[in-house]
Image (spheres, helix red, strand yellow):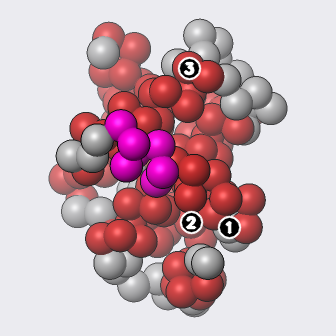
Amino acid sequence: MFENLLRSLLAPAPTRLPEPDARLALAALLVRIARTDGLYAVEEVEHIDRILMTRHHLGPFEAARLRSEAEALENEAPDTVRFTRALKAATDPEDRAALMQAMWAVALSDGSRDAEEDRLLRMVANLLGLTDVESNLARQRAERA
């Protein structure tokens, strides 16, 4: 089902993903972040759906379908490094801070900060070309939202 996208993610130098694949890749990374602490809470699922609806102008059913596909992809997807590099290639530099804010929003939506989530988000920020300061500002915006 995800062969072409997985092939792109596994390429030595990821190219810019087409929009449908970029949407799915982002959704799968959000799922991966939510699952990192071993608890995939209802609040995290709802937050992922809200992010997908807002970011991609989807209705609730389309967002839930995209998240469901992303859950399946996340199970099959390669390591987070390749995943994030492909997202970086698919995302304009000025939009990466907003992606980081969305990721922090998902990580924080279950009401707790987990060391593994923090570690993963530090790595993802670095791979997206963001500094620790930019990631911290994104986290603060997510906490206020």
Can residue 40 be seen at all in this image of the molecule?
yes
Q: Mark 2: few, some, or many residues within 10 Å (few <14, many ≥20)?
A: many
Query: Contact (CB < 8 A) between labels 1 and 2?
Result: yes
> Where 90 sits versus 124, above or below?
below
Viewer-nearest of discs 3 and 1: 3
What is the x, y in percent for residue 84?
51, 62
> Which is nearer the N-term, disc 2 or disc 3?
3
- For residue 83, the mark is 2
Amino acid found under the numbered disc labelled 3: Glu
* Quarter of the view holding residue 111: top right
Check disc 1 and report the residue beneath it: 77
Residue 123 in sight? no
Q: Position of residue 27 (x, y in %)?
A: 48, 51
Which residue shows up at 46% across the image and 61% down it?
A: 24
Which x, y percent locates residue 72? 67, 59
Q: Left or right? Give the position of 98 relative to 111.
A: left
Asked which secondary structure carries label 2, the reply is helix
Q: Which residues are magenta?
A: 60-66
Which residue is disc 3 drawn over?
Answer: 43
